[in-house]
Amino acid sequence: MALEIKKFTVNMFGVNTYVVHDPVSRQAMLVDPGMISDSEHRTIEDYIHSCGLNVRYVVNTHLHLDHAFGNVRAAKDYAVTPMAHAADRELGQALPSQARMFGIPGNFTPVDNFRAIDYSDILTLGNETVEILHTPGHTPGGIALYAPGSGWVITGDTLFQGSIGRTDLPGGDYSRLIDSVTTKLLSLPDSTIVYPGHGPSTTIGYEKSHNPYV
């Protein structure tokens, strides 16, 4: 049975936070915990509890602040260590300065306590597997989460409907981003549903035909 995905759009940047779960085992994964307010945390917590889910993983597709606002609270609430690519460690440590750069008030905790994951890691939810694709360019440690059995990929800020991630922030690299999109993502089956870090979902086939950047 395919993994189920629930999208929540959170914080002032409109980040897509995803709860992925196996409907049989009820094992779950929280992707990009961008929740910044108590109400955003409670909305997702209520969904997880109402579905009787057991959160096994908290995964960051990258460590820009908008995708990691809720890391510390999520780690505590679900008693798991968040995961991210090691190449984004410096970015996570700089989360407070990222907030200052965007003029966001508050005391933010650096994200430096996480389990490093890479392309060799495979996450399991019930009988389904989720593969890690390293997709640098938007950030050095950007990753995508690909579920071949369920036919979808969560792309973070690497690929959007009709667009790609920005590369003008620290650690961005346009040529690496284009390489990640073309070799790691557009090589997936055309029917693969794309769940991006912002905005609506799309498919790999649609982006091959319509995305002006590729």
Image (tube, rainbow, N blue to C red):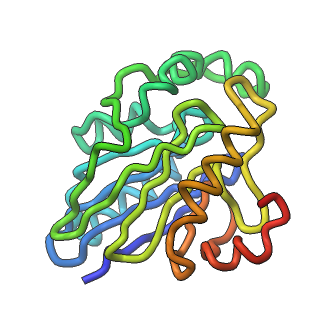
In which image quadrant can residue 81 be found?
top left
Residue 113 seen in the current view: yes
Q: The C terminus is located in which quarter?
A: bottom right
Q: Position of residue 195 (x, y in %)?
A: 56, 66
Q: Name the foreground residue: 193 vs 102.
A: 193
Look at the picture and state if 197 lies above or below 112.
below
In which image quadrant can residue 187 be found?
bottom right
Q: Name the foreground residue: 213 vs 69.
A: 213
Q: Position of residue 103 (x, y in %)?
A: 78, 25
Q: Where is residue 144 in the image (x, y as percent from the top left)?
A: 49, 52
Look at the picture and state if 119 lies above or below 188.
above
Residue 37 seen in the current view: no
Q: In this view, does 45 lie to the left or right of 129?
A: right
Q: Where is residue 97 in the image (x, y as percent from the top left)?
A: 66, 16
Residue at 58 percent across and 38 percent down: it is 136
Residue at 37 percent across and 38 percent down: it is 118
